[in-house]
Amino acid sequence: MSRQLFRKIKEYATHPLRVYSLISKAGFTRFVPDELHIRIMYRVLTGSKINLDDPKTFNEKLNWLKLHDRNPLYNTLVDKLAVKAWVSEKIGDEYVTETYASWSCVEDISIENLPDKFVLKTNHDSGGISICRDKSDFNLAVARKLLAKHLKHNYFWWTREWPYKDVTPMVMAEEYLEDVDGDAGLVDYKVTCFGGKPEFIEVHRGRFGNHTCNYYDIEWNPIRIEWAGIPIADSEVPRPCNLDKMLDLSERLSTGIPQIRCDWYDLGDRLVFGELTLFNGAGFDIIDKDNDLRLGELIDLSLAYGSDGTEALNDC
């Protein structure tokens, strides 16, 4: 038995509730009601009990919104393919990556008519991505195997983020993006908004290597948040060229939604929309206590769809 496998067995034996998370990822806990599942998962992944009767923290409120905010627009927002048309209509198609093709079955994927560089990714989950930087050296068989695995996965059953449940799984081919500083890799700017108001920006660098995340307020002053164990880089990130536009467009995309994150790539001469995230870390990421409470205060639960007898402003 390998030392790594022994450590894993010891870890799950010491904390038996973690077995629940493991079998949940495999789809064996579908019979468990949503609220009970969320309570168990929260305890498993954060080590704390969740208060869903009177939620106060950021994570507690996100999980409350999973159960109670049923805006039908959210099905479109979490679909990485369908959301492109919605974003184009809201702010213009110049901010949206080009989609070359889409398929429901990996056997149908053809790269013959694609450019030399492209990205294949699934529209309905996290991690289903294969990047081609040189078509002559691209292993399509390996990409198909990875993507086929993701097409079979329904993200909803592990996190109970209901908007994902009924998204039709697809693979899409879209344009490959390169940062102005190619050595640093593509920098990911994530603007978290509350009721249509941008509040702070996460800056992720080295996503496929030395992953770091720095946090800034909307004036680009550094702020300290300890989130999900991602290290904060020692060097600060320069203010992006298109910050003002990024904040303005994020505000337009988030109007009427209690909390949502808008992801962007600033390529200098071009600002590109990435995706929208309704439940950061599925509400299960560990955040330092002070910020969990501070950010929780910014979520207005009265904006939940239908909570005051009206429909959310974005549902149109």
Image (tube, grey):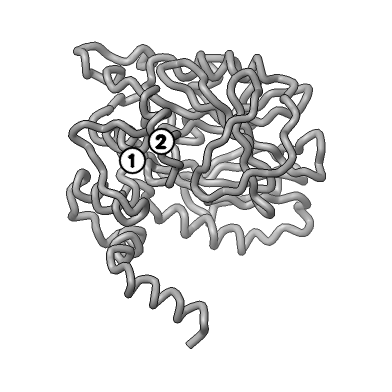
**For the residue labelled by badge 1, is the local secondary structure a helix, a strand or a loop?**
loop
Front tag of 1 and 2 = 2
Q: Quadrant of residue 101?
A: top right
Instruction: Work out whether residue 120 or residue 260 is closer to the camera in this orientation and state it.
Output: 260
Location of residue 227 in the rendering, given as x and y in whole percent from the top left corner: 50, 43
Instruction: Work out whether residue 234 or residue 23 is closer to the camera in this orientation and state it.
Output: 234
- Residue drawn 77% across and 43% down? 184
**For the residue labelled by badge 2, is the local secondary structure a helix, a strand or a loop?**
helix
Using a 10 Å C-alpha cutoff, classify the residue at mark 1 as few (fewer than 14 neighbours), some (14 to 19) or many (20 or more).
Answer: many
Q: Amino acid at mark 2?
A: Asp
Tell me if 23 is positioned left or right of 132 in this view: left
Location of residue 218 in the rendering, given as x and y in whole percent from the top left corner: 59, 20
Residue 267, relative to residue 169: is it above or below?
above
Q: Which residue sits furthest front?
A: 290
Using a 10 Å C-alpha cutoff, classify the residue at mark 2 as few (fewer than 14 neighbours), some (14 to 19) or many (20 or more).
Answer: some
| Tag of residue 29 | none
| Tag of residue 292 | 2
Residue 27, relative to residue 71: is it above or below?
below
Count of numbered circles in the view: 2
- Residue drawn 69% across and 37% down? 187
- Residue drawn 51% across and 24% down? 85
Location of residue 219 in the rendering, given as x and y in whole percent from the top left corner: 63, 18
Q: Quadrant of residue 224?
A: top right
The tag earlier along the polypeptide, 1 or 2, is 1
Q: CA distance from mark 1 to mark 2?
A: 20 Å
Location of residue 167 in the rendering, given as x and y in whole percent from the top left corner: 38, 39
The residue that disc 1 covers is: 161
Q: Amino acid at mark 1?
A: Glu
Tell me if 60 is positioned left or right of 224 in this view: left
Instruction: Work out whether residue 124 or residue 202 is closer to the camera in this orientation and state it.
Output: 202
Residue 47, relative to residue 205: is it above or below?
below
